[in-house]
Amino acid sequence: MNKIGLLFLFLTVTACSTSRPFKTSDGKKLPNSIAEIRRLKINGIKQFLTIRGVDRAKPVLLWLHGGPGNVAMPLYMHYSASLEEQFVVVYWDQRGSGKSYSSRISPASMTLNQFVSDTHELTKWLKTRFNQDKLFMVGHSWGGLLGFHVIDKYPADYRAFVAVSPITNGPRSEQVSYEFTLAQAQQRQDTVALTVLKQIGQPVNGIYKGGFEATLQERNLVQKYGGDYHRDLGGTFYRILRRSTEYNLLDYLKTKKIARLNSPMDHAIWPTIDLRGQIPVVNVPVYFCLGRYDNHLPSSVIADYYASLQAPLKELIWFDDSGHYSCFEESEKFNSILKKKLLPLISQ
């Protein structure tokens, strides 16, 4: 490759990230809108936010992505775009994820308590920046677990919390997920899958003897049997990630490093998670959004926690054509429900 070709490749990989502005019909920037990428130092670590809304005076909605550790914010931004009409949506790459990954992050700082503290510090900053006394918050999967711990400790900061397929019980979820894949493999006479499941064995307290690699093998079977994404969105996801202006190729190339940083924390806390005993009561309205086909974090386990949880207002909303990712698979319904449920709470 010649020097011009190398320069073009370098510029493509490291292209500056921008967030497309909101414009009027004649191409001018929409007054009072906000579309920015912000690098913010939170508890000593530089972390990235993409903040988007047609009107910066609208209520703030903070998205807590799944993981821990991923590079999926372009997907949340794509599927949540209509929420930007009614909210100022804050898409946050948490410590050690996405654009917030850094080799300088100490593995010792990767704890649930640290993430709760980070969320609290970010919330304080957002309340000041947008002159609001409370925020709305949405948490997906790991973000759901994080969100429950945040509202448990800092309930006065939030108007409501939306938990999308949250982690509620690590050991029980893993056992039910394994039983699902085993039953499916037996029903389909899938000898290859049965061999894999026999090899990795039953989880013990939520953990497989083969560690992270065994978990990936089990999750691949969950996806094969429609218990992760119920719809085939692989090609769509690729196009969304490729077309994102907020992320470049260099951000995506960090995926393995992000996994290595986050995996020890994931495996350390997984056996300890039981929200039914740890957070039996919250003082914030809570909405659960669950996919009927979710066997990544089986919905039956989450629904058990919902049934036991005490809250000033709670509601379980089922998504009948989704697995673990109802916010993507049925995004129109998801966004419509958030507007319908959350906006009336502003005046309360």
Image (cartoon, rainbow, N blue to C red):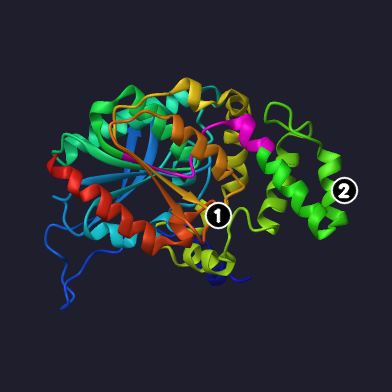
* Viewer-side residue, 239 vs 151: 151
* Viewer-side residue, 28 vs 313: 313
The answer to whether residue 10 is above or below residue 203 is below
The answer to whether residue 31 is above or below residue 123 is below
Helix, strand or loop at mark 2:
helix
Q: Is residue 43 visible?
A: no
* Magenta region includes residue 92: no
Q: Which residue is mark 2?
A: 195
Q: The C terminus is located in which quarter?
A: top left
Mark 2 belongs to which amino acid? Thr
Circle 1 crowding by C-alpha within 10 Å: few under 14, some 14–19, many from 20 = many
Residue segment shown in magenta: 161-175
* Viewer-side residue, 224 vs 74: 224
Q: Report x, y in % for residue 20.
A: 30, 64
Q: Left or right of 31: which side holds 49?
A: right
Q: Is residue 71 visible?
A: yes
Helix, strand or loop at mark 1:
loop
Q: Residue at x 58, y 60 (%)?
A: 230
The residue most toward the front is: 307
Q: Left or right of 218: which side holds 20?
A: left
Badges 2 and 1: C-beta atoms under 8 Å apart?
no
> How far apart are the two marked residues, 2 and 1, measured between alpha carbons?
25 Å
Mark 1 belongs to which amino acid? Gly
Q: Report x, y in % for residue 316.
A: 40, 45
Q: Which residue is mark 1?
A: 323
